[in-house]
Amino acid sequence: MTRTGFPSKAGGMIGSVVAGFDGSPQSSGAAYWAAREASLRAVPLRLIHVQEPSAPGHVFRAPGSRSRRSAQRLLAQTADELRRTFPALDISIHSVEGSPIDVLSESAAGSDLVVLGSRALGPVMGFVLGSVSMAVIGASNCPVVSVRAESDASSGDLVVGVDVRQRCEALLRFAFDEAEQRGCGIRFLSAWALPPLVGYGAAYDPRVHAQLEMSTKATLDDVLRPWKKRHPDVRTTAQATVGHAATQLVASGREAGLTVVGRRVRDSSLGTHIGPVAHAVLHHARTPVVVVPLT
């Protein structure tokens, strides 16, 4: 048992959806999104509040006994509201002391998803994820979802970014399973950049562009073919496009229900790294974004 009390799935126990909660509108939106997702998956929902006394001013910190009681009361109220909306859902609440990064990352070991809220900076600047959220995304061994407070969890296809040069089995498994649970389609996108000088001035050759597009699309189709056979009821489209991958994903995902990206699992002495594409999509996509760890 971990300090959060979650059993390991390796022991044959059912998975769960975990939502970090700090009483903010962002975390309330994340809790609702997580409840709907847990209901779709028919797994329990765990709402976790973490108090870190040693980190003054931290977004997850509830300093003092009065603030702690207030956070616990909000946690219980949120759970009661969710039970009225999702009466069949098993919901439990956990208010613990410790490092938010450690507790939330630890909870991922026995969970299907970890869900966190993000704060809007404005229509131009996008969204901000705190250091805890970024660290949890980088440390968790299960998918982590960043949810905006105003996100609509009920509509839209999935938009999935695929790097055809990398192994992406975990990404595709998540995408097809999620689409089946939601009863929606998937739009796969593989973006690529033109070789140096090809897109500039007299050096531009539309034949090169067309050949690269055809090659990338063919590779993407090859990657998707076995997954489409396993999930014949999932409606899919695939597109290869020129440009920066994050920019293309943000633009394509404006009307999506969920944007899905992968991150490489790698250790670094310099700290958490989730990759430039995932980082940019997390900060600029208007939809919920799920980051899937890839091995």
Image (spheres, grey):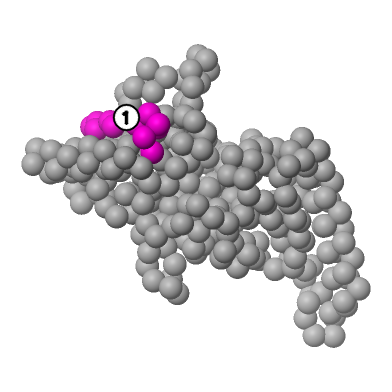
Looking at the image, the residue that sits furthest to the bottom is 202
Q: Is residue 218 left or right of residue 239?
A: right
Occupied quadrant, residue 50: top left
Q: Is residue 177 visible?
A: yes
Question: Looking at numbered disc 1 in the image, what kind of residue is underneath it?
Answer: Ser
Q: Is residue 209 left or right of residue 6?
A: right
Asked if the stretch drawn in magenta spans residue 101, the answer is yes
Query: Up-down: is 60 above or below 126?
Result: above
Circle 1: element type: strand
Q: Is residue 167 visible?
A: no
Occupied quadrant, residue 150: bottom left
Locate residue 164, reporting x and y percent: 76, 50
Q: Residues within 10 Å of mark 1 (few under 14, many from 20)?
A: some
Locate residue 73, reporting x and y percent: 17, 40
| Residue at the image point whose x is 72% and y is 49% from the top | 235
Q: Which residue is mark 1?
A: 92
Query: Relative to the observer, which residue lies in front, 202 or 247?
Result: 247
Looking at the image, the residue that sits furthest to the top is 11
Locate residue 114, reporting x and y percent: 44, 39
| Residue at the image point whose x is 86% and y is 54% from the top | 218
| Residue at the image point whose x is 67% and y is 51% from the top | 185
Region rendered in magenta: 86-102
Occupied quadrant, residue 44: top left
Quadrant where the C terminus sits is top right
Query: Up-down: is 200 above or below 12?
Result: below
